[in-house]
Image (cartoon, rainbow, N blue to C red):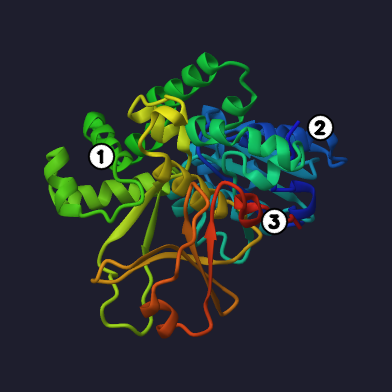
Amino acid sequence: MIQREVNLENNIQKNKVLIIYGARRVGKTTLLNDFLKTTKLKYKLDNGDNIRLQELLQSQDFSRIKEYVEGYELIALDEAQQIPNIGMALKIIVDQVKDIHVIVTGSSSFDLSQKVGEPLTGRKKTFILHPFSQSEMKMQYNTYELKEKLDSFLIFGSYPDVVLAKTKKEKIDILNELVDSYLLKDVLTLDNIKFSKKLLDLLKSLAFQVGNLVSLNELSQQVGLDVKTVDRYLDLLEKGFVIKRVGGFSRNLRNEITNKSKYYFLDNGIRNALISQFNSLDKRDDIGALFENFLIMDKMKNNNVVSNYYFWRNYEGKEIDLIEEKEGSLYAYEFKWNKSRVEPPKNFINGYKNSKFKVINKDNYLDFLITSFT
């Protein structure tokens, strides 16, 4: 069993709501159920799909909600984004019921966060659950074993079901099901989007541009949508835990590019499933993109590290793959699959005297990714 980074026991608090966001099938329900098996609190577990529960909680009828909670120390709601006005119902519970603990999960951050944002100001703690990180898997595997599995992570990603699958066929079947049945479910539902094919076309276009600067105008032409619609879809896909936008870094140099972005997939397996590319690494010409996507997304998975992430590029074509801004310091990283010597761009080094530069390759990548939990 692979230990998850998010420890519910250490983070639940009386009269506060612990919210766990994450894509479908990343293990939110498993995490919640595993915690409930060991907690000493008397709990009630319910699901947001329950129509009677939806009617009760959206009623905001305090007397009825109090009856629902009565006698329990912990209320756990899975898929809470399904419940209208859930934020006000949770506010009533944590404000009016003494010493109550509340945990909710949601696969749709944009939907659930809108519903709980203002009502739960100062009354919530939030975590995002991702596919397995290297830090999490280091609890199960040693360094040698993780490096042995690197090819698999680059091709098939690290969704829990995929990591635990025994064969290549099983991994591919799971990923195809994720793309066909789960990937766009929340996005399509939230915005009443009817053109799922356009969304898939957009994602496929992004899949071929991992690590490159993305032009909204070019995407618009490629998928046959206007620029504003493309921009809106990209925002929804990011909030739906499908892609991640990384912007350009600039503080003091006039020739730095900041008006374009790069987009990465939260999971390599999803990216490869979208374009039906599961070939081994020795038969691919996109190893650099796969490695970069894997490293950047895994680096961003740690809920305990507060950092800002950017790419850096100037109009002369000089670039750095990732800039991490942490505790007032800048860390610049260049990603190379094979070990090679790379000199940092002079413009960047001269412009940011206190920055540190490092090249990350397949030999030292775990030192870059592995961090301890708290």
Label 2 residue SS? helix
Label 3 is placed on what type of residue? Thr
Q: CA distance from mark 2 to mark 1?
A: 43 Å
Mark positioned earlier in the residue sequence (1 or 3) = 1
In x, y percent, where is residue 197? Answer: 23, 29
In x, y percent, where is residue 48? Answer: 55, 34
Label 1 residue SS? helix
Label 3 residue SS? loop
Q: Nearer the viewer, mark 2 or mark 1?
A: 1
Q: Which mark is residue 37?
A: 2
Residue at the location (56% across, 80% down)? 328
- Mark 2 residue crowding within 10 angstroms, few (<14) / some (14–19) / many (20+): few
Which of the pair 187/219 is nearer the observer? 219
Which residue is labeled 1 in the image?
A: 205
Residue at the location (24% across, 52% down)? 231
Q: Nearer the viewer, mark 3 or mark 2?
A: 3
